[in-house]
């Protein structure tokens, strides 16, 4: 089974790196990319992915608000929040919004794919 | 002559001599030695006359001394009355809850026309402020003056109240506080800006680089690339620590004690046991930021110099003052007796001390080879009143 993903990240280089790394996995496919939370919500409506990899800090609509919208409209879609900040309040806000997991950006590729597989099952 | 005068003032001695001379007179009379008797009579008479004059003189001297003392007392009392009448400090004495004495300044400063509040309850009602009434407090009058009130319990149901116009002091303090607040806000803004730039640019670039290296390593199987990827992860970890150091978001969201606990993470990571005893109250952002930066500097010193195994941080808020003490059990800065190392130039510590003193606080750093280092400071808390309850019971 292939895990269908959307990557929502405003920083182009990071988004490109994430997409390239995830696409390299045989059991994963990045079906869409978004540069802000609002675009991510629209892609979720359109593509109904299994999992959204969502950056917390993004313009237009941040990752927390986008997570809340996604979980209301598509409760079955898994949302994994990623952030460079290791803050308890961010985790709490994400959990409150319905996020399924939280990962630090510096955790590395292996940790990322392991977490994606764990949540998407 | 003086010896005789002293002798004659003594009634017992005088009585014994008088009796002796009397007996001598009787004895001489029996032996009919008329010359001796006459001499004795003359001596006795002379003695009585001398004693009379000396006692009379003493009485006059005592009366003069008494009058002088009385005049001195009256002059002193008059001076005191004049001083109190002219004093800019208002004074009122309450005894058993009733106003017993007051001076004009008391009425003037409290903007009272006529007599002062006759009892303690009326006085409290006049000066009661939103803050808890303590031994010393300030309030603003209807005319906009800042009045400081000091209460001194004298015991036996007596309370001395003194009031001063501190309008100029309050304005000066407000100007200084505003300057400190602006200074702290500017510095924190700069730190936050740097943190954001690091996050928005450097951290993102490193994240992308890390994924790129990891992907390249995965595709090529090159171990060197995998090591480089791991290095970027380590750089990210250091950078995240720097971001927290620059802009401790937890300070804004959870307050001083929580932020200090988070700041201790770096020490704990090196095996140092850090015990933070604090409180959950929130204070003004300026005070929290000043205190946090000071504790952060203390931690840096512990990390750099102390080789300590245990660090304790005590945070106490009492009587509108924040007390903080960071103590370690490591090796001190100097092997000599306790010494004020702030005199020996450590830039970080110096800057912390300057900032704290500018904010009206106090700072000390004591270090010994045997007992480790104690980094302590106080900061005044504006707009917060944690003080003793009113002394109403004392005078009720």
Image (cartoon, coloured by chain):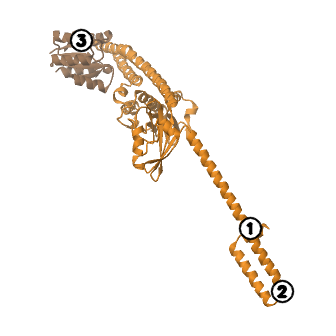
Secondary structure at numbered mark 2: helix
Q: In which chain is the residue bearing label 1?
A: B
Q: Are marks 1 and 3 on the same chain?
A: no
Name the residue beneath numbered marker 2. Answer: B34
Secondary structure at numbered mark 3: helix
Secondary structure at numbered mark 1: helix
Q: Are marks 1 and 2 on the same chain?
A: yes
Name the residue beneath numbered marker 3. Answer: A38
Q: Nearer the viewer, mark 1 or mark 3?
A: 1
Q: Nearer the viewer, mark 3 or mark 2?
A: 2
Q: Tell me which label, 1 or 2, sits earlier in the chain.
A: 2
Chain letter of the brown region: A
Q: In which chain is the residue bearing label 3?
A: A
Give the percent coordinates (x, y) of residue A63: 26, 17
Viewer-proximal residue among A101 and B146: B146
Instruction: Measure how far apart labels 3 and 2 are at the Cα level.
Output: 143 Å
Q: Which color is chain B depicted in?
A: orange
> Quarter of the image holding residue A47?
top left
Give the percent coordinates (x, y) of residue B317: 41, 38
Q: Which mark is residue B54?
A: 1
Viewer-proximal residue among A31 and B76: B76
Position of the C terminus of chain A by quadrant: top left
Q: In which chain is the residue bearing label 2?
A: B
- At x 67%, y 54%, the residue is B68
As displayed, is residue B122 above or below residue A106? below
Give the percent coordinates (x, y) of residue B284: 40, 29
Position of the N terminus of chain A by quadrant: top left
Within-10-Å neighbours for mark 3: few <14, some 14–19, many 20+: many
As displayed, is residue B215 above or below residue B240? above
Give the percent coordinates (x, y) of residue B276: 38, 37
């Amino acid at each position: 089974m292939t895990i269908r993903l959307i990557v929502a990240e405003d920083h182009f280089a990071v988004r490109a790196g994430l997409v390239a790394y995830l696409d390299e996995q045989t059991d994963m496919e990045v079906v869409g990319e978004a540069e802000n939370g609002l675009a991510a919500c629209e892609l979720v409506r359109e593509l109904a992915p299994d999992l959204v990899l969502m950056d917390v800090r993004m313009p237009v609509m941040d990752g927390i608000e986008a997570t809340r919208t996604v979980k209301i409209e598509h409760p079955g879609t898994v949302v994994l929040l990623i952030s460079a900040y290791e803050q308890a309040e961010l985790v709490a806000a994400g959990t409150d919004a319905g996020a399924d997991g939280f990962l630090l950006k510096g955790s590395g590729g292996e940790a990322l794919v392991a977490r994606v597989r764990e949540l998407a099952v | 002559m003086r010896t005789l005068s002293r002798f004659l003032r003594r009634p017992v001695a005088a009585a014994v001599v008088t009796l002796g001379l009397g007996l001598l007179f009787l004895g001489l009379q029996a032996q009919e030695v008329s010359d001796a008797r006459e001499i004795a009579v003359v001596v006795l008479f002379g003695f009585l006359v001398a004693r009379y004059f000396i006692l009379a003189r003493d009485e006059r001297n005592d009366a003069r001394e008494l009058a002088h003392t009385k005049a001195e007392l009256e002059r002193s009392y008059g001076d005191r009355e004049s001083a109190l009448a002219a004093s800019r400090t208002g004074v009122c004495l309450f005894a058993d809850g009733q106003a017993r004495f007051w001076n004009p300044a008391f009425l003037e400063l409290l903007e009272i026309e006529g007599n002062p509040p006759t009892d303690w309850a009326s006085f409290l009602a006049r000066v009661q402020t939103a803050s808890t009434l303590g031994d010393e407090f300030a309030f603003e009058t209807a005319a906009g003056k800042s009045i400081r009130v000091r209460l001194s319990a004298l015991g036996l149901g007596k309370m001395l109240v003194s009031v001063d116009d501190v309008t100029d002091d309050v304005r000066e303090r407000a100007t200084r506080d505003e300057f400190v607040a602006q200074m702290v806000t500017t510095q924190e803004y700069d730190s936050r800006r740097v943190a954001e730039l690091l996050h928005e640019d450097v951290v993102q670039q490193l994240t992308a680089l890390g994924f790129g290296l990891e992907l390249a390593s995965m595709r090529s199987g090159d171990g060197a690339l995998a090591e480089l990827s791991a290095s970027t992860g380590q750089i990210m970890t250091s950078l995240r620590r720097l971001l927290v150091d620059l802009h401790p978001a937890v300070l804004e969201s959870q307050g001083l004690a929580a932020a200090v606990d988070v700041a201790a993470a770096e020490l704990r990571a090196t095996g140092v046991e850090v015990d933070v005893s604090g409180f959950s109250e929130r204070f003004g952002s300026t005070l929290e930021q000043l205190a946090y930066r000071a504790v952060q500097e203390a931690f840096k010193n512990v990390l750099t110099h102390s080789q300590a195994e245990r660090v304790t941080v005590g945070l106490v808020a009492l009587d509108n003052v924040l007390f903080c003490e960071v103590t370690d059990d490591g090796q001190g800065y100097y092997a000599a007796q306790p010494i004020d190392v702030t005199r020996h130039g450590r830039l970080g510590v110096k800057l912390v001390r300057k900032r704290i003193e500018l904010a009206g606080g106090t700072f000390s750093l004591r270090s010994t080879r045997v007992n480790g280092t104690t980094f302590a400071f106080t900061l005044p808390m504006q707009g917060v009143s944690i003080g003793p309850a009113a002394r109403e019971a004392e005078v009720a």
